[in-house]
Amino acid sequence: MAKKLVTLTVNGETHELAVEPRELLIYVLREKLRLTGPHVGCETSHCGACTVDLNGKSVKSCTVLAAQADGAEITTIEGIGKPDALHVLQEMFREHHGLQCGFCTPGMITRAYRLLQENPTPTEEEVRFGISGNLCRCTGYQNIVKSILAAAEQMNAMKEAAE
Amino acid sequence: MKDLDEREERRSALKGLGCSRKRVEDVRFTQGKGHYVDDISMPGMLHGDFVRSPYAHARVVSIDASKALALPGVVAVLTAKDLEPLSLHWMPTLAGDKQMVLADGKVLFQGQEVAFVVAKDRYIAADAVELVEVEYEELPVLVDPFEALQSDVVLREDIKDAKEGAHGPRKHHNHIFTWEEGNAEATEQAIGAAEVVAEEMIYYHRTHPCPLEPCGTVASMDKVNGKLTIWGTFQAPHVVRTVASLLSGIEEHNIRVVSPDIGGGFGNKVGVYPGYVCAIVASIVTGVPVKWIEDRMENLMATAFARDYWMKGRIAATKEGKITALDVHVTADHGAFDACADPTKFPAGFFHIVTGSYDIPVAHVAVDGVYTNKAPGGVAYRCSFRVTEAAYCIERMIEVLAIELGMDAAELRRINFIKKEQFPYQSALGWEYDSGDYHTAWDKALKAVDYEGLRKEQAERVEAFKRGETRKLLGIGLTHFTEIVGAGPVKNCDILGMGMFDSCEIRIHPTGSAIARLGTISQGQGHATTFAQILASEIGLSADSITIEEGDTDTAPYGLGTYGSRSTPVAGAATAMAGRKIRAKAQMIAAYLLEVHDDDLEWDVDRFVVKGAPERFKTMKDIAYAAYNQAIPGLEPGLEAVSYYDPPNMTYPFGAYICVMEVDVDTGEWEVRQFYALDDCGTRINPMVIEGQVHGGVTEALAIAMGQEIAYDEMGNCKTGTLMDFYLPTAWETPNYTTDFTETPSPHHPIGAKGVGESPNVGGVPAFSNAVHDAFRAFGLRQSHMPHDHWRIWKIAQSLGLHQ
Ligand code: FES
Ligand code: FES
């Protein structure tokens, strides 16, 4: 199959890649760029394990063609925090036991990261609705919701302190 | 006082038992640095994919792979014919049956593996799957187990004439086994003589564990060194190694099985699937690594399902409600092959815990296993071997009996509970319950939810409904469950002949940190966190200084793996026992260093102290250093220990769950208003982790009770093969839960812990289901099968004439 050249800026780094027109973004990220944080749980847009941030929106990268993402700015879980500078969400998920097997976690945090930019002061209901595209089989969500609300609070406090 | 404070400070610095220690695993998981099987990539790695049967029952007339093989990038297409010379076209199941690895002459369920394509990448493999031409000749399909037992249609031609199966005589060509426990005659007599008898068919429908990560493997045969390495989603890696050795003829020391991080298991990853076998064979043949990762549809359609039990119960009682007998007959739909994951001697698992929390003088159960044209399995989905089925059966039967007696279901439970002083309690079906205090838990639960107030509100609601003021009913779902976990004593529990002990091996490093390796494997339970806590309390080193490792058969001691809530009861016990061995040697070293007799020392949190002279002590850190650096007469250097633990009995966690649910009569919609979960899992190692397990387990129970189902049409088509149709609740409809506990330690477990992972699923399903039933009790509902999705609830209301 004739390949197509695409440019993807992922976690701040720009890559030129030759991809097949049918290649899914999730596999390009996982297998070509070796960013194995986003996972594959269904390939049918239901589970959200593959969630990445694409041009400022949460998308399920199992349902986006790499060719469609040409020129896009993409953030994956690997770009959200660094080992010595974790994102508040990453800290709060640990603090409030917001994960168990960890398989949904990268997608969940990536979604929450965008959610808190769309709505920095969400109610519990808004968090629940906002992450309803991401399934978790282990936690029953209660502690995930708690983690996100705690992160929102901290981020707002930090913002206030900075102002 | 000061001494006490100082001691407490040292104790809390250990982060041992009872501490809500933050999980060490989370550091990597939150950064996307978990390492799951699909993350493995190796040079030259090939990808496998299956051609699967579109039919539920058909003869395979021919397979033509020539077009697929002509596609550039395709390396091989395996069929049963290729596997036959290796005797790998069939494989043994955990239940003593055998299963086709690739279709051998016919297919027996939709989605069955027919051919295995090996190609350079996953896209080419998928293309090639489409190019394999298979000609089928359709055969009559049996999806109903009752019909299967009457039908002339033979499903398993390979054992058509076998009068004996793995578990005794077979009654029909589609019959697998009959298994019985208890006293049939005495039970019949008691039922015949009873003042009240309630009879009901309770169906626990077919469902699926559906962990978020599907199953998969990477097999790599290193032809130079003759070593085979298998990474995979294995809940029991050591068993996989033994089975792989027996099947392949490769000596066991030349096989290394690794379970990397596992994205949830819930029983789905206990068994051995054709994909594993095919990937291994393909790697042995090609000499390069072969990866096979199933997709979600394959996971739901072809890997092991759970439940599918038709339970016909009869429960007898006096007019006052004292239960006098219980009889249950189960028709168990096992699908095309008996691939149940149960200890060998128990083809229906521990279903005979079906007398539940109640003191029932006589009981009898019989289970008939049946073949149908459905996917094989029968795994313990977040359950200790058919315990969820048993708990659901008895907790429904109690409700039905309450209706029959016109009694309050909470009171009926209370007067039949096994009393605290009756433990250890011998059940009529042969178990010895180790410990319990049901009345205390029950009273605490009823009080917490204001049970009486709820009943009043419910009665008022019914009146309001009758007056036409509301269209919503209120259901109060009660459950008191008793679990049986921690398989188990080797004398009666084994899997494929391997005794179900577990193990821990500890090495203390000279500077006073440690590594412990276990035969189990975490799939989200947080073993790396909690096992370190058990050990910290035993040996007096901080949990933060202890690494826990599992899942690599080259380094970890042999163990039977993680399922059936057995890790804490069995491997947790092994950890404590190995820790005690360390401490025993440490005591000798301390005695030498302090120049006193062993007996003059006492253990004090993290050190040995000379009795009566607290200023003279040696900490575990001091001792560790000395163990390696000081010549001690009569003692070998080093500080290591290993323990293989064979538990004397199972443990019996229990709990009281109450669900308060609003049900809309016109739409069938429901809303959980309150869910209260009280668990007694004995000694609590990490309350935060326990709470997390309960949240997750109750949510899985919510899914199962309220919508999740593997359903087939009459042609044997699986109707629920994607997450579009197979219900997994989102954050939106999942309620918040209130968790609570009592603490009745297990008398025979070294630290008194009982295990908790599965309790919430065992107790949760009847709590949700009873709530639905209870909402309609005032209008005459006795029994309606799960899952209670909106449509089915609407149908209940319709059949009771509640629609205007
Ligand atoms: S893998 Fe993309 S939504 Fe499930
Ligand atoms: S933590 Fe396992 S799926 Fe969410």
Image (spheres, rainbow, N blue to C red):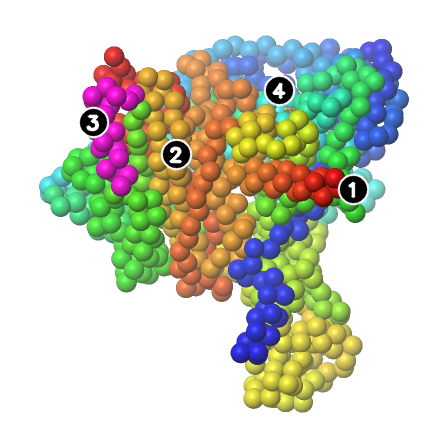
Q: Looking at the image, is mark 2 or mark 3 earlier in the sequence? A: 3
Q: Magenta segment, which residues?
A: B453-471
Element at label 3:
helix
Direction from residue B525 to residue B628 in the image, left or right: right
Q: The residue under label 1 is which amino acid type?
A: Lys
Direction from residue B56 to residue B66 in the image, left or right: right
Pointer 3 local density, CA inside 10 Å: few below 14, some 14–19, many at least 20: few
* Disc 4 to disc 1, C-alpha distance: 30 Å
Q: Are discs 1 and 3 less than 8 Å apart at CB?
A: no
Q: Which label sits on residue B463?
A: 3
Disc 3 is attached to a residue of which chain? Answer: B
**Can residue B336 be seen here?**
no
Element at label 1:
loop
* Disc 1 to disc 3, C-alpha distance: 60 Å
Residue tagged by mark 1? A82
* Disc 2 to disc 1, C-alpha distance: 40 Å
Viewer-nearest of discs 4 and 3: 3
Viewer-nearest of discs 1 and 3: 3
Above/below status of B486 relative to A6: below
Q: Check if residue B633 falls in the magenta segment.
A: no
Residue tagged by mark 2? B673
Q: Find out if the beta carbon at label 4 lies less than 8 Å from the nearest ligand 1 atom.
A: yes
Residue tagged by mark 4? A44
Expressed as whole percent of the image width and height from the top left, the position of residue A2 reads 85, 10
